Amino acid sequence: MAGAEMSGMETALKRTAEMAAVFMIGDGLLGLVGPERHVALWRSKVGTVDALVRPFADRPGRRRAYGLFQIGAGLLLASRLRR
């Protein structure tokens, strides 16, 4: 019984990690191909949300570089997930 629970927990953790990888890759790709649009979409009146994208405002090159980093990190994360 405990083995089945652990297996279910491991599966849940791996699925969560893969979902994070998918988000990282997708967000990175969107930031890479349309940095101005992507940053403008995420600008917010909520200070903590806006603080995340403010460093990329009017800096499309910086956002593209971060997009490449996100894609690489997401691919690395996904490649480390084993069955």
Image (cartoon, helix red, strand yellow):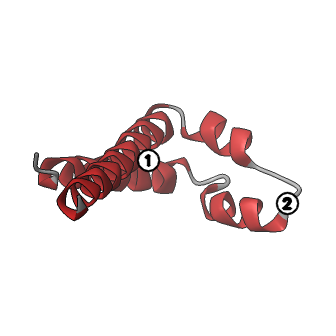
Query: Residue 28: which disc?
Result: none
Residue 68 visible somewhere in the drawing: no
Mark 2 surroundings: few (<14), some (14-19) or many (≥20) residues within 10 A: few
Left or right: residue 40 compared with residue 78: right
Residue under pointer 1: 64
Q: Please give the name of the residue rendered at 50% of the width and 51% of the height, measured from the top-left corner.
A: 63
Going by the numbered disc 1, the residue's amino acid type is Arg
Give the quadrant of the C terminus.
Answer: top left
Going by the numbered disc 2, the residue's amino acid type is Val
Residue 20 horizontal/vertical position (percent): 40, 49
Residue under pointer 2: 46
Residue 21 horizontal/vertical position (percent): 34, 47
Q: Please give the name of the residue rendered at 89% of the width and 56% of the height, measured from the top-left corner.
A: 45
Q: Please give the name of the residue rendered at 45% of the width and 32% of the height, measured from the top-left corner.
A: 33
Left or right: residue 1 compared with residue 52: left
Badge 2 marks a residue whose secondary structure is loop
Q: Out of 13 and 48, give the one closest to the viewer.
A: 13
16 is higher (above) or lower (below) than 41: below
Label 2 close to label 1 by CB (< 8 Å): no
20 is higher (above) or lower (below) than 53: above
Outermost residue toward the left? 83
Left or right: residue 65 compared with residue 4: right
Mark 1 surroundings: few (<14), some (14-19) or many (≥20) residues within 10 A: many
Of the numbered discs 2 and 1, the one sitting upstream in the chain is 2
Select label 2 or label 1 by which is in front: 2
